[in-house]
Amino acid sequence: MKKRNTPEEDSARPAGSKPEQHDDTSNGSSSRRKFLTAATAVVGATGAAIAFWPFLASWQPSARARSLGAPVQIDLSKLEPGARITVMWQGKPVWVVRRTPEMLEALGHDHLLGRLRDPESEVDTQQPVYAQNELRAINPEYFVVIAICTHLGCVPLWRPNFPEERIDEDWMGGFFCPCHKSKFDLAGRVFTGVPAPTNLVIPPHWYAEPDLVEIGVEDENYLNELPS
């Protein structure tokens, strides 16, 4: 809208000259420019944040990354005695078994030890040095093992109850592979007379807390405490 001059301003204007025009749109244009500038900045910042998010997300191990090799933590506080849980690590199933006092007692029977191929875990490729003991564990109560038969890579069945004559008339609990009848005791030690050549594999692990086991990493303190 044009501003109209007062009669005094018209009389003071030289003859023949055009009335002075005032552009009131200048303030509006300035406001629009400020708005567009701010909007562009917001959109740019949002775009940068969206572009940056995958980079931030990459710092967090995904479920796939964990299954391919990232360490896996397991809360043991709710695992009942005699129960078992399964997690994936490096694309392999890993079992954590909470052994009962009866299970631990069964592992020391002379009758059982005489039927095992490697009762002292002398094949050192099958477990870390800190699990190279009769119970093949750091904490006797918790047994951590890769659930893959050492014959042809099948996943054995968890058969903790005993006796179970369908597997063995002297069965004292453990793992049974139905594919080719390989048998392992409650410490993953292989029986004689079966196709599986070695004990089940114990993965590297440590206890970050009494009820928190982490698979895929080791604590140097375990190694330092071993006899030389």
Image: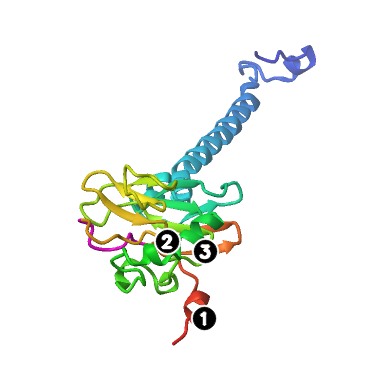
Kindly identify the amino acid type of the residue bearing the numbered disc 3.
Answer: Pro
Image location (x, y in percent) of residue 216: 42, 61
Residue 199 within the magenta-colored segment of the rendering? yes
The image quarter containing residue 109 is bottom left
Please name the colour scheme applied to the rendered image. rainbow
- The residue that appears at 54% across and 59% down in the rendered structure is 141
Residue 29 within the magenta-colored segment of the rendering? no
Image location (x, y in percent) of residue 117: 28, 66
Q: 185 above or below 225?
A: above
Q: 50 above or below 151?
A: above
Q: Residues within 10 Å of mark 1 (few under 14, many from 20)?
A: few
Q: Quickly name the residue at label 1.
A: 225
Task: Indicate which disc residue 145 carries.
Answer: none
Image-based side of 81 in relation to 215, left or right: right
Image-based side of 26 in relation to 215, left or right: right
Q: Quickly name the residue at label 3.
A: 140
Q: Quickly name the residue at label 2.
A: 216
Most foreground residue, 43 or 3: 43
Determine the secondary structure under disc 1. loop
Image-based side of 34 in relation to 189, left or right: right
Q: Is residue 59 visible?
A: no
Residue range corresponding to the magenta coloring: 195-201
- The residue that appears at 50% across and 71% down in the rendered structure is 219
